[in-house]
Image: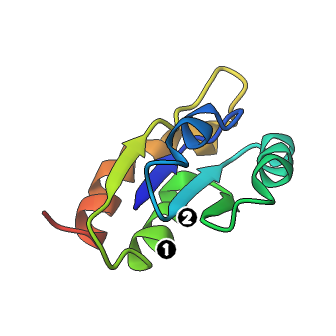
Amino acid sequence: MFVETGTYLGEMINAQEGNFDRLLTVELDPELYRKAVRRFRRLAQVSVFQGDSSVELPKMVAAVNEPAIFWLDAHYSKASPPAVRLTHLSLRTRVGTAAPI
């Protein structure tokens, strides 16, 4: 299983779709999310989520029932609202709480 935060244009999912039976990705930006849904609509093994990764990732982790690789690539930009910037500060803690190593 491959779990990604920060879908952006979907290049990492595209590159990895032949290497994993299941791929999960989350994108904050609604337009980029819609583009990713369209891009991967024919790939049953790809699930695209929309929202803040610090909120959505723990939900995604709850669905992991096999070894997984986590590609934590979500990050804020200058265009991100201040609330998004703050929530990313706690992402590592939330993932650690949801899925201890």
Q: Where is residue 29 in the image (x, y as percent from the top left)?
A: 76, 43
Numbered label attached to residue 24: none
Res 50 quadrant in image: bottom right
Give the structural element (helix, strand or loop) at label 1: helix
Numbered label attached to residue 56: 2
Q: Are discs 1 and 2 less than 8 Å apart at CB?
A: yes
Q: Which of 20 and 100 is in front in this view?
A: 20
- In the rendered image of this protein, does residue 45 appear above or below residue 90? below
- Residue 37 appears left or right of 16: right
- Residue 5 appears left or right of 70: right
**Would you name the residue on which mark 1 appears?**
59
Q: What residue type is labelled 2?
A: Glu
- Residue 13 appears left or right of 89: right
- Residue 4 appears left or right of 33: left
Q: Position of residue 82 (x, y in %)?
A: 63, 36
Residue situated furthest left in the rendering: 101
